[in-house]
């Protein structure tokens, strides 16, 4: 990973925490103390101030192979039958196990509620058809049988699964609605992040947005967002590339964008509506959930600051 000019002067441990968000600060500090973190080839202390152009390398120990175990965690089930389950994931809950998060995942909760999903999909993501970021709340689709899984994955590939999100972003888009059609791929210098890439260096990604409310005094805006494709961090990357990062996004928010004075308690991003064809009955199912209280409080705060201008 290469230190950008914008990041110059940050403490090494804080810089790593921002660029390796899936790992805890304590774990990163332990790696630094063990000499597993080098800056331009030299081990450095946690308090070292990084400089522009320096190359930071992290030697990560091989991950432990862990069997996913069911955990009887609370799940808000919105829809359920013998083939399909749809849950309303809270912000802060990781979907499936990964580095630094072995327990307390939605996958473990699904396995406890529907043990048959153990043989559906990947070993550590039982029946989970798509994913939501840890800080994002909302509807998540789960298949309970192999037949249902194959059907729903095919629908995702064919772009017939509809997904509507609600987001609060920094800044006010100049247009009331728009389409962002820009390829997304791995960041060229930071492999844990995604980025808008030149044509041919990323996968096509299409995001549609519509402004619901404007708060120019903040400035901020409340958006409805619809996905036509499903790339990793697509909404966050696309909106940040337009100069309107999602509030609460410490990964894709440029340092030049000030933090809001209200904490969205996660990403100000919510998967509010999900539509798909039932893999057994063939009927179209559309489900919706209301905004979580954390985002309602955020919008209430913004409305108190300034009466919104309706789009």
Image: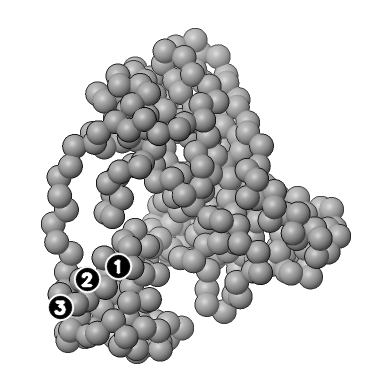
Where, by quadrant of the figure, is residue 248 drawn?
Answer: bottom right
The answer to whether any part of residue 203 appears in the image is yes
Where, by quadrant of the figure, is residue 107 drawn?
Answer: top left
Which of the two labelled residues, at mark 3 and mark 2, occupies the earlier sequence position?
A: 2
Of the 4 image quadrants, the one containing the N terminus is bottom left
Looking at the image, residue 254 sits to the left or right of residue 95; the answer is: right
Q: What x and y, as percent, mark residue 93? A: 43, 45
Looking at the image, residue 185 sits to the left or right of residue 30; the answer is: right
Residue 26's disc number? 1
Which of the two labelled residues, at mark 1 and mark 3, occupies the earlier sequence position?
A: 1
Q: CA distance from mark 1 to mark 2?
A: 6 Å
Residue depicted at 63% across the width and 33% down the height: 289
Secondary element type, mark 2: helix
- Above or below 143: residue 106: below
Secondary element type, mark 3: loop
Q: What x and y, as percent, mark residue 87? A: 49, 30
Q: Which residue is mark 3?
A: 35
Q: Say few, some or many: other residues with alpha carbon within 10 Å of mark 3 (under 14 / 14 to 19 / 20 or more).
A: some
Q: What x and y, as percent, mark residue 233? A: 46, 53
Residue 30's disc number? 2
Q: Say few, some or many: other residues with alpha carbon within 10 Å of mark 2 (under 14 / 14 to 19 / 20 or more).
A: some
């Amino acid at each position: 990973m290469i230190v950008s000019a914008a990041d110059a002067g940050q403490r090494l441990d804080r810089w790593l925490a921002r660029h390796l968000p899936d790992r805890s600060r304590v774990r990163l500090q332990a790696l630094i103390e063990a000499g597993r973190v080098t800056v331009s080839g030299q081990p450095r202390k946690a308090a070292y101030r990084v400089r522009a152009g320096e190359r930071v390398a992290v030697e990560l120990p091989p991950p432990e192979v862990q069997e996913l175990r069911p955990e009887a965690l609370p799940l808000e089930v919105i829809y359920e039958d013998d083939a399909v389950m749809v849950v309303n994931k809270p912000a802060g809950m990781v979907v499936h196990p990964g580095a630094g998060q072995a327990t307390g995942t939605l996958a473990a909760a699904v396995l406890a509620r529907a043990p048959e999903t153990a043989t559906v999909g990947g070993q550590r993501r039982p029946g989970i058809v798509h994913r939501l970021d840890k800080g994002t709340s909302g509807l998540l689709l789960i298949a309970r049988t192999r037949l249902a899984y194959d059907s729903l994955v095919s629908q995702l590939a064919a772009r017939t699964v509809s997904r509507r999100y609600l987001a609060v972003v920094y800044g006010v888009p100049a247009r009331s609605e728009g389409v962002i059609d820009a390829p997304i791929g791995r960041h060229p210098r930071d492999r844990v992040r995604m980025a808008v890439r030149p044509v041919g260096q990323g996968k096509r990604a299409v995001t549609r947005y519509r402004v619901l409310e404007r708060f120019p005094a903040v400035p901020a805006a409340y958006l409805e967002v619809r996905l036509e494709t499903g790339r990793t961090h697509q909404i966050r990357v696309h909106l940040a590339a337009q100069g309107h990062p999602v509030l609460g996004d410490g990964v894709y928010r440029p340092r030049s964008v000030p933090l809001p004075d209200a904490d969205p308690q996660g990403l100000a991003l919510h998967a509010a509506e999900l539509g798909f064809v039932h893999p057994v009955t063939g009927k179209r199912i559309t489900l919706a959930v209301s905004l979580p209280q954390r985002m309602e409080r955020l919008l209430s705060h913004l409305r108190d600051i300034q009466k919104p201008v309706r789009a």
